[in-house]
Amino acid sequence: MDTVLFLLFTLSYSTLIAWGLKGIHRNHLTTWSSLIYIVTIGLIYDNAVMGLGKWIGEGTFLEFLNALRFWSHAFLTPLLVLYSVGVLRESGIKWANTTWISIISTLYTLFLIILEIQLETSKLTLIPKMEFGVLRYVSSESDGGPPIMVLLVTVVLLIASIIVWKKTNWPWFFIGTAVMTIGSLVPIQINSSAVTNGFELFLIWTLIWTKKRLVKDELKV
């Protein structure tokens, strides 16, 4: 069942990118909020590797593909910090356009990438794991909880989403972040390892929807 879910997630993310890019002009693709599309490409890869794992089979190649999952996560997930700043700018938050915010957010993003590499990725020892019909390689030292980097990114998403909600009356950025946060922290007793990925999909949908909504509002002005 989980194999089907991961493949459906892969298709859903691909559809989200197509929908998100539809009608977006080139000048709207050069903003920081467009980094959400790069993050989504990483999630397409992540879910595809897990969905196809049992057909690829246990071995060096699948281990390599899974190692790339961890490395892409380390480099791409922190980009949500810059996405958040981009959304603040497109919401009309003047201080988000200042040089010092650009410098701080960029340095914070680099800090999160380095933190994840130091604490998690560089020390990876991968072992095969078959769970609910899905074959993948996981960290032998994983405690099952979200990495510190993810928690620090989530804090930024929550703060930015509240500001955007207050400024534009658009709640979906906050709703997506809140649902993802609760879904990651609250144990759900269900025979599936794909539940968290479902919450991620919902989050990404709300983030892309937020991007499109802000672009649409800007074109109306």
Image (cartoon, rainbow, N blue to C red):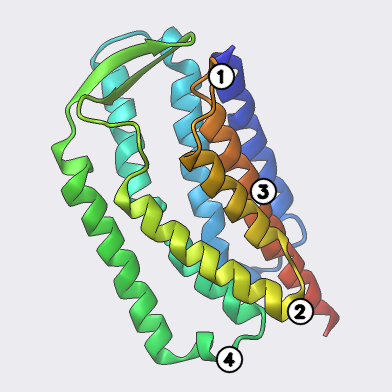
Label 1 crowd bin: few (<14), some (14–19), many (20+), radius 10 Å: few
Q: Residue 16's spot in the image, x, y percent?
A: 68, 44
Say the numbered circle drawn on residue 205: 3
Amino acid at the residue labelled 1:
Ile
Say the numbered circle drawn on residue 72: none
Whole-number angstrom distance, CA of label 3 to CA of label 2: 20 Å
Say the numbered circle drawn on residue 94: 4
Res. 194 in view: yes
The mark nearer the N terminus, 1 or 4, is 4
Amino acid at the residue labelled 4:
Lys
| Nearest to the observer: residue 185 or residue 163 | 185
Whole-number angstrom distance, CA of label 1 to CA of label 3: 23 Å
Which residue lies at the image location 67% right of the left edge and 64% below the top edge?
211
Whole-number angstrom distance, CA of label 4 to CA of label 3: 26 Å
Q: Residue 146's spot in the image, x, y percent?
A: 37, 42
> Given this view, does label 1 or label 4 mark the residue nearer the observer?
1
In the picture, measured across the screen, residue 153 lies left or right of residue 27, that is left
Q: Residue 187's spot in the image, x, y percent?
A: 49, 31
Amino acid at the residue labelled 2:
Glu
Label 2 crowd bin: few (<14), some (14–19), many (20+), radius 10 Å: few
Amino acid at the residue labelled 3:
Trp
Q: CB under 8 Å between callouts 4 and 3? A: no
Q: Pointer 2: what residue?
A: 218
The mark nearer the N terminus, 2 or 4, is 4
The mark nearer the N terminus, 3 or 2, is 3
Q: CB under 8 Å between callouts 1 and 4? A: no
Q: Residue 34's spot in the image, x, y percent?
A: 57, 63
Whole-number angstrom distance, CA of label 2 to CA of label 4: 15 Å
Whole-number angstrom distance, CA of label 1 to CA of label 4: 45 Å
The residue positioned farthest toward the right in the image shown: 220
